[in-house]
Image: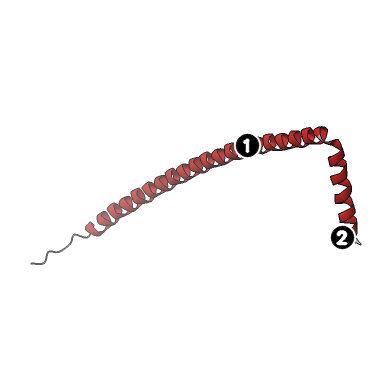
Amino acid sequence: MATAKAPNSGTANTGSTRDKLHQAYHLAGEAAHDTASNVKMRARETADTVKARTRHGMEKGKQRAQDVAEKAENSIKAHPLVSIGCAFAAGWLIAKILK
């Protein structure tokens, strides 16, 4: 059984649809904003973690370099003639290679 629509019923339905679309648009905007905020927060946390790891690695590398330099210095002090002989041999070898 078909019923006749009232002349204004189409505009009322259109207004309701517009309201629903407006609400959906608003909710989608809020969701996008929340997602962007979460991504920004995670990126900041990741960057902080990477900075901390890098800083720790650099400190560890500096300490290692200082240890190696100290060992080399102690070895040179313990065996000065051998050190001079090795330096002379390395210089002579490099000179022969470059000729």
Q: Is residue 74 above or below residue 97?
A: above
Estimate the x, y position of residue 23 in percent, counting from the top left: 34, 48
Mark 1 crowd level (few <14, some 14–19, many ≥20, 10 Å Cα): few
Give the residue type at disc 2: Ile
The image quadrant of residue 82 is top right
Left or right of residue 28, residue 40 in this image: right
Left or right of residue 30, residue 72 in this image: right
Helix, strand or loop status at disc 1: helix
Between 57 and 2, the one lying in front of the other is 57
Residue at 74%, 35% (x, y): give it. Answer: 71
Between 84 and 98, the one lying in front of the other is 84
Mark 1 or mark 2: which comes first in sequence? 1
Estimate the x, y position of residue 47 in percent, counting from the top left: 56, 41
Left or right of residue 39, residue 16 in this image: left
Estimate the x, y position of residue 49 in percent, counting from the top left: 54, 39
* The furthest residue to the left: 1
Estimate the x, y position of residue 80 in percent, counting from the top left: 85, 36
Disc 1 + disc 2, Cβ < 8 Å: no
Left or right of residue 60, residue 49 in this image: left
Q: Quadrant of the N terminus?
A: bottom left
The image quadrant of residue 73 is top right
Numbered label attached to residue 55 = 1
Q: Give the residue at mark 2.
A: 97
Give the residue type at disc 1: Arg
Residue at 92%, 62% (x, y): give it. Answer: 99
Between 51 and 21, the one lying in front of the other is 51
Q: Is residue 69 above or below residue 24?
A: above
Between 91 and 31, the one lying in front of the other is 91
Mark 2 crowd level (few <14, some 14–19, many ≥20, 10 Å Cα): few
Helix, strand or loop status at disc 2: helix
